[in-house]
Amino acid sequence: MSEDAFHLTPLDIRKQEFRKTLRGYEPMGVEDFRLRVADELERVIREKSVLEERLAALTEQLQVFRERERAMNEALVAAQQLRQETRAAAEREAQVIVREAEAEAKRLLDEARSAEGAVRARMAEAERQFQAYVGGFRGLLERQLAELRALDGTQG
């Protein structure tokens, strides 16, 4: 039987009248029972009302928690995406820095090799000039020695 089919209030119980019969129930007992049933029904209705209010509050609180959970999940997903994007950007930036550093190292190495070549060329030129000078000086000394021998031979 559904609740809508038979709806009974405490007032309905208090106002209910029973026909009297010769062999009926004791009127005081029926009246006492009717009052106790009405009191119990009032208590149950109050308790039901309190429980319905509590259920409504808990349902509302559950909705708030679900919204917070959804917001936290969205924030977590956004944070994960941001972390991935940041990591990818950092990796790209690191690759650019490495490429730039490699290019700079190659340029410096090329400059050093070029400078080394220039120093070697100047060194070779200095060595050639020194050998030419030594050769010229040796020739001069040999001529001077020859003249001294010649002078020595004419004097002695």
Image (cartoon, rainbow, N blue to C red):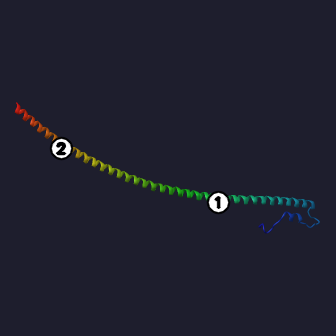
- In the image, which is nearer the foreground, mark 2 or mark 1? 2
Is the Cβ of the residue at disc 2 closer than 8 Å to that at disc 1?
no
Q: Position of residue 156 (x, y in %)?
A: 4, 30
Whether residue 126 is situated above or below residue 103 in the rendered picture: above
Question: In this image, 47 relative to 85: left or right?
Answer: right
Residue at left 32%, top 51%?
Answer: 111
Q: Which residue is mark 1?
A: 67
Question: In this image, 8 relative to 120: left or right?
Answer: right
Callout count: 2
Q: Position of residue 51 (x, y in %)?
A: 76, 58
Residue at left 57%, top 56%?
Answer: 76
The label shown at residue 114 is none
10 Å crowding of disc 2: few (<14), some (14-19), many (20+): few
Whether residue 6 is situated above or below residue 138 in the rendered picture: below
Residue at left 12%, top 37%?
Answer: 144
Q: Which residue is mark 2?
A: 132
Say what amino acid the circle numbered 2 marks. Ala
Compare residues 108 and 4 and report the one nearer the observer: 108
Say what amino acid the circle numbered 1 marks. Glu
10 Å crowding of disc 1: few (<14), some (14-19), many (20+): few
Who comes first in sequence, dot 2 or dot 1? Answer: 1
Compare residues 127 and 144 and report the one nearer the observer: 144
Indicate the secondary structure of the residue bearing disc 2.
helix
**Alpha carbon separation for disc pair 2 and 1:** 95 Å
Q: Position of residue 92 (x, y in %)?
A: 45, 56
Quadrant occupied by the N terminus: bottom right
Spot the residue most to the right.
Answer: 22
Q: Position of residue 29 (x, y in %)?
A: 91, 59
Compare residues 116 and 51 and report the one nearer the observer: 116
Indicate the secondary structure of the residue bearing disc 1.
helix
